[in-house]
Image (tube, rainbow, N blue to C red):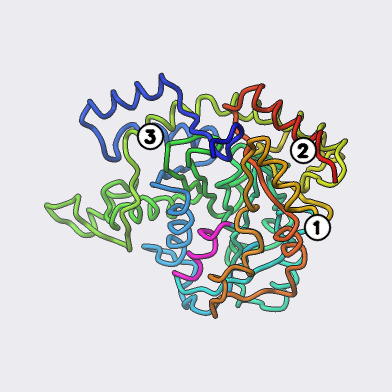
Amino acid sequence: MNYSFPLVAEGISNLEIDLLIQVVKSGNLTMGKRVETFEEKFAQVMHVRNAIMVNSGSSANLLALESLVRSSSNSLFKSGHENRYIAVPSVLWPTTIWPIIQLGFRALIIDVLPNSLEMDLNALKRAKKQLGEKLAGAFIIHPLGKSVELSEIIDHYSQDELFVIEDTCESLGARNKNGLAGTSGIAGTYSFYYSHHITTIEGGMVVTNNDELADDLRSMRAHGWTRNRRDKNRWNSDFGSHEEDFIFVTSGFNFRPMEIQGALGLSQLNQLDQFIARRQVLASRVASAVQNCEGISLIDSACARYTELRETHSWMSFPFLIDDIENRRKILEHFNNFGIQTRPILSGNFFQQVAAKNKKIKVYEDVLNAKKIHQHGFMIGNHHSLSDNQVQVLIDCIESIHT
């Protein structure tokens, strides 16, 4: 079916297509000056010391954790990390949890708050008190454009006690009272998939204010060599060789981005404020329509809280709850009849997925709120390229719901 209101939109202009053609014709294809310029600009916009681009947001998550485990000089896990836990929220995308398992940790699933997609931070504190050093860190997701307020965790625990990686892949540009989402923990990750706030088609970024960590990230995204490190002269001096570009100091992958991604990212980043402002306008219209609708509500930003969230929320998508589960099929069919594509909210309650039957995944206390989201929730897209006519179709659909 061709949807008039699809879940995702490409968001690439004709001028940007011409730009990408110019990059390809230049012959400079793999990671180079354009990627470096995009990284520098991104760090400036996010008010951080370092931004390291990779080939996807999923790679960014894996690389951020890898850099803590296998640091070239100052690992957080000198005494090992196997069988220690890292907390994740119960409603997530799988590429937040799998790096934890793949790198030898155990995952501790903590429920989200009622009528919310954000991790219950009080439950996280209880888990830390009970598990002590067995709970090493938390991979906290800023969900669908909303910034989770992390000051009570960041201020309460040192990084050695409980490190925080912020998965901000869904929430570029979202803010809390401490600043931009993704910039408070030891590292923050972002995705530039083509339906997100800015796109490089595929692509991601890790940001950090820790310079040593940043250099390890630069090594690890490209085989583990020193070539792109800021401190490579020190390594070259310590391990002198006439082959200075082929000194390997840590573990590595090939997560390098391409020059077309750097060029596109720079173009899109220059429009970020405009893109978010448009998403916020669309959110205002949808929130107003939902406020007068019986049977469904917007999760965690439902009408009464819209004014509070208006200036801080970057609105990647619209997550809904259906009041009566018996009406779920009828309401989803109603959206489909209007040509509006729907989907589950992320992966729903992840513990209900077949893949979650892994012995290294454990639920803390319960996941009752995630179960409700799994059963009653659904999601539709929000994109700055949507036309006023497309948005009106959505408004008409919402206003004509009869339960």
Image location (x, y in percent) of residue 346: 61, 54
In primary-sequence order, the first of circles 3 and 1 is 3
Q: Secondary structure at mark 3?
A: helix
Tell me if residue 11 comes above or below residue 380 in the rendering.
above
Label 3 vs label 1: CA separation?
A: 47 Å
Question: Which residue matches tag 2?
Answer: 309
Numbered disc 2: secondary structure: helix
Please provide percent x and percent y for residue 48. Answer: 53, 41
Q: Residue at x 47, y 56 (%)?
A: 64
Residue 160 location in percent, x, y? 58, 67
Mark 3 touches mark 2? (CB < 8 Å) = no
Placement of 28 over or under 147, stated as above or below: above
In this picture, residue 12 sits left or right of residue 84: left
Within-10-Å neighbours for mark 1: few <14, some 14–19, many 20+: few
Which dot marks residue 326?
1
**Magenta highlight range:** 93-102
Relative to the observer, which residue lies in front, 2 or 217? 2
Residue 31 spot, x, y in % from top left: 30, 40
- Residue 331 shown left or right of residue 167 in the figure: right
- Which quadrant does the N terminus fall into? top right
Residue placed most toward the observer, 327 or 75: 327
Q: Amino acid under label 2?
A: Leu
Picture quadrant of residue 308: top right
On the image, numbered disc 3 is attached to which residue? 262
Q: Secondary structure at mark 1?
A: helix
